[in-house]
Each structure stands twice: as C-alpha cells, then as structure tokens.
Amino acid sequence: FKTLKYCPAFPGRFGSLQDARVFCDVFFRYYNNEHRHSGIALHTPASVHDGTAHEIQARRAQVLDAAYAAHPERFHRRPAPPALPTRAWINQPPAIIETEEALPTNQAA
C-alpha cells in the first residue's frame, strides 16, 4: 500500500467512505492497466495477467532491432527488452511440502 499512500493525489484524509472508494477505484484502475512496473519488465499487471505481455514484448524487440539496424553506432551492444518474469507475486506464498502429517487423516497412506 506504500505506492497508494505515496501517490501525489492521495488525500491526507477522505471525507467519507464513498470518497475513499471512488479514489481507490480510479487509482487501482490506473495502477493495474496503465502503470508500467519495473518488476514485471515494464508491463502493466493487466497485460501480464491476460497474456498480452508476450505480444507486447515481441513488438518491443522488433522496435529495438530496427533501431539497432538503423544506427548500431548508438549502442554498446544489441538492445533487448527486459525479460518477462515467469511468475509475479505481491506476497509470494510459502512453499508447502506435503507430507503425511500435512494431509487430512482420511487421505493418509
């Protein structure tokens, strides 16, 4: 929630619960659909979630390839878009190792 609270538009106080809901609705719509996140290769959470990030990534690579082909002297090496994450988490769940003790009693071997 740090991103929310440090948003320049975040008010010191909300006048009502309805005001808070309206603000959060606008903020989360922006954050999920427009804001590019460095942790997910400068994509939006929505594009990673709906699978369009791969198509966007391919177009970015084409643009970078064209820029390199046109002016290779401007680059130290061939540019590439940041790699897409294999998984993205806000709070990564702990790894769970299933053992007989972790299974319900009716499923134990």
Image (spheres, rainbow, N blue to C red):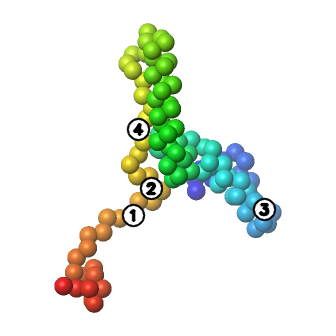
Q: Amino acid at mark 1?
A: Pro
Residue 94 picture quarter:
bottom left
- Quarter of the view holding residue 34: top right
Tell me whether circle 3 and circle 4 mark residues in contact (CB < 8 Å).
no
Contact between labelled residues 2 and 4, with CB atoms less than 8 Å apart: no
Task: Tell me the tag on residue 19.
Answer: 3
**Badge 3 amino acid:** Asp
Residue drawn where x is 28% and y is 90% of the image: 106
Disc 1/disc 2 C-alpha distance (Å): 8 Å
Q: Nearer the viewer, residue 7 or 39?
A: 39
Image: 30 above or below 62? below
The label on residue 83 is: 4
Mark 1 element type: loop
State the separation of the CA atoms marked 1 and 4: 23 Å
Q: Give the Cα separation between the discs numbered 3 and 2.
A: 29 Å
The three-letter code of the residue at mark 2 reads: Trp
Residue 5 in percent (x, y) is at 64, 53
Circle 2: element type: loop
Q: Which mark is residue 54?
A: none
Give the mark, 4 or 2, whose residue is nearer the N terminus.
4
Which residue is drawn at the image coordinates 47% and 42% (left, top)?
54
Q: Say which of marks 3 and 1 sits in front.
A: 1
Which residue is label 1 attached to? 93
Front disc: 1 or 4: 4
User: Which residue is more in the foreground, 74 or 58?
Assistant: 58
